[in-house]
Amino acid sequence: MVNSTIELPDSSSTIQFEKDHDVIERLCAHLAAKPKELRNRPFTLQNDTWTSWTVRESVYKRNQGSFPIMARGLFTLKRDERHCIVARGYDKFFNVNETKYTQWTALEKETQGPYEITTKENGCIIFIAALSSQTVIVTSKHSIPEPKDNPQSHGGVGYRWLQKHLQSAQASEEDLASWLWSNSITLVAELCDDDFEEHILEYPPHKRGLYLHGANYNTAQLHTLPSQLVHQIATTFGLWPVSFTTLDTIAQVKELASKVQLTGKMDGREVEGIVVRCQRQDQDFLFKVKSEPYLVFRDYREVTKSVLENPDAAPKYTYPKAYYYWRWIQHRLKDHPEWFEKYTLSKGIIDVRQKFEAYWEKGDLTLPDI
């Protein structure tokens, strides 16, 4: 078996699943009491029904520490009158300075190292879980594709990429399914495929696919495996591993975060930002830091979508540079409308941004009024 070399940490023997039923019961009660805050949706898979749970973003922030389960991306199943978790993402985590728990002062006082720093890839989150000991299922955050290799859905494209990755490692779907099933683990990956859907940062053809950045036990409380082990899982099954480094102190994290925020790069490569994994109150805890260049580029995308929807309205943006981008695309929509023909289908986003950056680098920002 290709997975026989993956040794889980000793602490895995203490993982508890017994409380999961009660947690999901509380989630059901919350749905009944406050249906505007969350919803669920059933998916029929073979002889089982998986339930996907979607929670409004604001609910996570408002109920930190009190909501039944903080998992962002959650699939459950009821067997023998008891709920169990069959796939789960990370607990919802926030940007530095976004909540009271992610202020630098709070992080200094309340978190413990070591601090694992992973690159934040720029794609769509994908979950890989076991449907049985022979079969895997690949989902998006809240949906399961039908059929499972549906080329129009994130999960379906993710499944197609998974088959390619497994083949490259001379592993089979059954190898992976057996390992996930026996350990009750969900793999968390980023689907980065510009041919299917562009985001902000470019992934050339030889760098596309699934980037594995996490492996979580299917438990109500978040238990996520160390990055070094996640890296080993990725290489075993042929997925792209994400870069990571380990730091001892929050001061070191803050120094690295400042560099990534300013340059938009880690290890010389453009990234969306970084994710920091550590401990808080003896539990796994994550927070993130976004890069400034990425956020500026994201402003461009949102400005473009706004202008395409309503050309006469001034778009909203955060960064001053986006004003010049707005003026520039007003002209480009007139002399190069073909650049934007598939923009709302997530195609052309990177090309238009790169063209503007080339214009910006020339330094002549004078444009006639529209």
Image: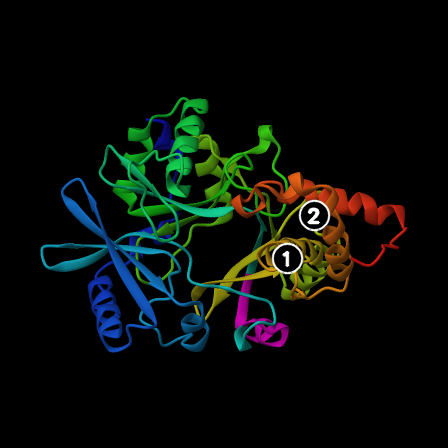
Q: Is residue 268 visible?
A: no
Q: Nearer the viewer, residue 288 or 232?
A: 288
Q: Determine which quarter of the picture holds residue 320.
A: bottom right
The amino acid type found where label 1 is placed reads Val
Q: Nearer the viewer, residue 236 or 299?
A: 299
- Look at the numbered discs 2 and 1 and tell me whether their residues touch, using CB distance below 8 Å: yes
Q: Count the marks.
A: 2
Horizontal and vertical percent for residue 207? Answer: 58, 32
Q: Is residue 265 visible?
A: yes
- Is 334 rendered above or below residue 106? above
**Magenta includes 109?**
yes
Q: Residue at x 54, y 69 (%)?
A: 111
The amino acid type found where label 2 is placed reads Leu
Dividing the image into 4 quarters, which one contains the N terminus? top left
**Mark drawn on residue 307:** 1
Q: Is residue 32 left or right of residue 219?
A: left
Horizontal and vertical percent for residue 247? Answer: 62, 56
Q: Residue at x 87, y 54 (%)?
A: 365
Q: Report the Cα–Cα distance between label 2 and label 1.
A: 10 Å
Dividing the image into 4 quarters, which one contains the C terminus? bottom right
| Secondary element at tag 2 | helix
**Magenta includes 164?**
no
Task: Give neighbour class at mark 1: few <14, some 14-19, many 20+ (Cα, 10 Å).
Answer: some
Task: Give neighbour class at mark 2: few <14, some 14-19, many 20+ (Cα, 10 Å).
Answer: some
* Majority SS type along the magenta span: helix
Horizontal and vertical percent for residue 254? Answer: 68, 64
- Is 114 rendered above or below residue 151? below
Q: Residue at x 70, y 52 (%)?
A: 264
Q: Earlier in the sequence, mark 2 or mark 1?
A: 1
Q: Residue at x 61, y 54 (%)?
A: 308
Name the residue beneath numbered marker 2: 333
The boundaries of the magenta stretch are 102-113
